């Protein structure tokens, strides 16, 4: 199995550095990814309560959020058990890849599960999810422009 760690540059110019935000695993014909749920802070308290109640391996259903004004590629996640509650989003950096998987895989071969609920963690690290899906023909993960290397000579900090 091969793995690719995904990192994000810190938004804090004093701290700087990189923060790990995900890990992609590549197995023969299978896409496996673990990520933290995004967007929980924008949802009502009932969604947070539902996240606290999730059990390990509880399935989550992805929904293409075509009318999302903040991200036209957004993929929302909702529960199946205990009522259908929207609990958050696939991270923006993965949303285009997840949409490409939807285009190339039958929905029965796309699964997302609650991996772990971190009850004492900040909201952005509250729910770790695991996604498994088929690997569509010609699929190249992390190939969008948001994954292009930062050119040499670009300042690490913004002056402002």
Image (cartoon, grey):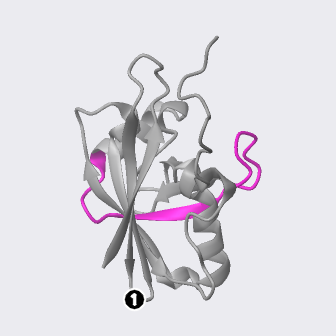
Residue 62 in which image quadrant: bottom right
Crowding at dot 1, Cα within 10 Å, few <14 / some 14-19 / many 20+, comes out as few
**Hey, which quadrant is residue 107 in on the image?**
bottom right
**Residue beneath the point at 34% across and 47% down:** 127
> In the rendered view, does 106 fall on the left or right side of 111?
right
Please state the horizontal and vertical placement of residue 49, each as a whole percent of the image: 36, 38
Per the image, is 115 magenta?
no
- Can the viewer see residue 55? yes
Write down the residue under mark 1. 28
The image shows residue 139, relative to residue 54, as above or below, that is below
Residue 122 percent across, percent down from the top left:
33, 30
Quarter of the image with the N terminus is: bottom left
Q: Which residues are magenta?
A: 53-73
Relative to 85, 36 lies left or right? left
Q: Residue at x 70, y 46 (%)?
A: 71
Question: Who's the residue at 45% across and 88% down the image?
Answer: 29
Is 65 placed above or below 51 here? below
Q: In the structure shown, which secondary structural element does the residue marked by tag 1 occupy?
A: loop
Q: Give the residue at the far top of this rendering.
A: 160
Give percent across and percent down for residue 112: 42, 67
Q: Is residue 15 above or below residue 123?
A: above
Q: Nearer the viewer, residue 119 or 103?
A: 103
User: Residue 124 appears at what percent x and percent y?
Assistant: 40, 37
Question: Is residue 35 shown to the viewer in this render?
Answer: no
The answer to which of 72 and 9 lies nearer the viewer is 9
The overriding secondary structure of the stretch rendered in magenta is: loop
């Amino acid at each position: 199995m091969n793995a690719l760690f995904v990192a994000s540059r810190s938004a804090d110019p004093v701290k700087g550095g990189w923060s790990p935000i995900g890990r992609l695993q590549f197995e023969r014909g299978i896409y496996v990814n673990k990520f933290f749920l995004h967007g929980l802070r924008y949802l009502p308290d009932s969604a947070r309560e539902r996240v606290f109640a999730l059990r390990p391996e509880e399935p989550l259903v992805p929904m293409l959020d075509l009318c999302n004004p903040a991200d036209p590629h957004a993929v929302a996640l909702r529960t199946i058990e205990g009522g259908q509650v929207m609990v958050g989003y696939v991270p923006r950096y993965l949303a285009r890849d997840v949409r490409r998987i939807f285009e190339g895989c039958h929905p029965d071969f796309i699964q997302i599960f609650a991996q772990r609920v971190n009850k004492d963690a900040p909201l952005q690290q509250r729910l770790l999810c695991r996604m498994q899906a088929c690997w569509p023909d010609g699929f190249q993960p992390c190939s969008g422009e948001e994954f292009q290397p930062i050119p040499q000579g670009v300042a690490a900090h913004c002056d402002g």
